[in-house]
Every structure is written in structure tokens, then in C-alpha cells.
Image: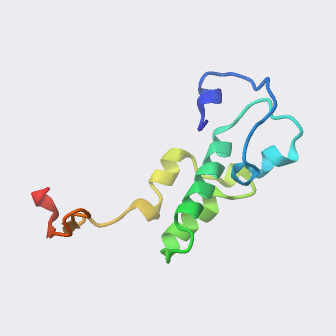
Amino acid sequence: DFDGVQMHNVTMTQPLQTTKQYMAPELLRDEVADKVESAVDMFSVGVVLAKLFENTEISEAIKSLISSLRSEDPAKRPTALEALHHEAFQVEPVKEASCAICLDIYPADEG
């Protein structure tokens, strides 16, 4: 739920229903998760990013981001803000854009 539980300061009272591959390791180790921390959500973000880039050639920056998000140690995972400031998101402005529908290429400032 990407931080909805913690945002409302709710404790989990029902059994966990989830896809285990998206679960942070600390949740898999503990029998009961009383409170969901933001690091748990960031682990899931890392798994989603890894799935999005699966079978695709990716930069070292993206690999580094995914690796940090999927860290076994929750204290070593970046926060959402830290992840957004990661070098993987620091790119040059696009000078050319393309239209996927009409296949035209035009300067990006023409919108």
C-alpha cells in the first residue's frame, strides 16, 4: 500500500496477504509485522523497478539504485526523497522527442 498504513499510524490486525517476491526481507523473517516502515515500501519499489527493467540493458546508475533499494538491511535503503535524488534520475534535458503514434521526431520545446 506504499506507506498508507504508516501514514495513518495504523497497526496491522489482519493476516498479511501479499506476493512474497515484493516483500522486504525483514517482513519475511518476522512472524508478525506490527508496523510497516517506509523502508519496506522502498524495497518493493526496488523490486518493481527491477521488473520494469528486466531483459533490458540498463545503466550502472539504474543498477545502483535498484541494488540500494533492495538492500537486505532496511537502514541502508534510501528514502523516497533520497531515491529521487539518486544519479539515476539526474539526466540531461531531452533535446528531441518523438510521437509514438505518428512516429514524428521534433524538438522537445515544440511540445
Q: Check the image and report above or below for 77 versus 36.
A: below
What residue sits 62% from the left and 60% below the top? 68
Residue sitting at the far right: 31
Q: Measured from the top left, where is residue 58 in percent x and y?
A: 49, 74
Q: Is residue 74 left or right of residue 65?
A: right
Q: Which of the pair 104/46 is nearer the observer? A: 104
Q: Position of residue 29 (x, y in %)?
A: 86, 47
Q: In the shown orientation, is residue 63 left or right of residue 29? A: left
Location of residue 107 with respect to 70 vertically, above or below: below
In the image, residue 67 sits, relative to residue 16, either above or below, namely below
Residue at the spot x=87%, y=42% of the render? Answer: 30
Quarter of the image with the C terminus in it:
bottom left
Quarter of the picture containing the N terminus is top right
The picture places residue 95, in percent across and down from the top left corner, at 19, 68
Q: Position of residue 55 (x, y in %)?
A: 55, 74
* Quadrant of the image occupied by residue 110: bottom left
Which one is in front, 32 or 74? 32
Q: Quadrant of residue 104?
A: bottom left
Q: Residue at x 44, y 54 (%)?
A: 85
The image's colour scheme reads: rainbow
Query: Number of numbered discs present?
Result: 0
Q: Residue furthest bottom?
A: 57
| Point 63% across, 64% down: residue | 67
* Extreme residue in the front direction: 101
Q: Is residue 37 above or below residue 20?
A: above
